[in-house]
Amino acid sequence: MAKLSRDTVFTSTTAAKETTLDKTTRIVREITEGEAEKRQTKMARLRAARLEREANTPAEQTAAPTRKTTKKTPGKTAGTA
C-alpha cells in the first residue's frame, strides 16, 4: 500500500476523465489547426511561384486595347405600316 501523508491523501491520483464536449472540442481544434496549417503552406507555395513568375517575366508595357466600334444599321421600326 502507498505511504499516506498529508500531501497524498487529499490529492486525486487519477486524472479527470475527458468529457464528450472536451473530446469534441479537442478534435475540432485539431482539424481546424491542421486545415489552417495546410492553407498557410499552400499560400506560401503559391506566393513563391507567383513572385518567381513575375521575376522571370519581362516587364511589358501594354497599351490599352483599342475597341472596334460597329455601326448600327437602322432596323425596321414597329410603328410603320
Image (cartoon, helix red, strand yellow):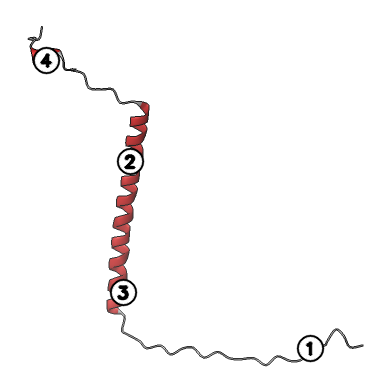
Give the mark nearer the N terminus: 4 vs 2: 4
Q: Nearer the viewer, residue 68 or 6?
A: 6
Residue type marked 4: Thr
* Front tag of 1 and 2: 2
Give the mark nearer the N terminus: 2 vs 3: 2
Report which quarter residue 40 is drawn in. bottom left
Q: Secondary structure at mark 3?
A: helix
- Image coordinates of residue 49 in percent, x first then y, are 30, 68
Give the mark nearer the N terminus: 3 vs 1: 3
Residue identifier under label 2: 29
Residue contact between numbered discs 4 and 1, judged by CB atoms under 8 Å = no
Residue identifier under label 1: 75
Circle 4 packing at 10 Å, graded few (<14), some (14-19), many (20+), is few
Residue type marked 1: Gly
Residue identifier under label 4: 8
Circle 3 packing at 10 Å, graded few (<14), some (14-19), many (20+), is few
Alpha-carbon span between mark 4 and mark 3: 66 Å
Give me the disc on residue 53.
3
Alpha-carbon span between mark 2 and mark 3: 36 Å
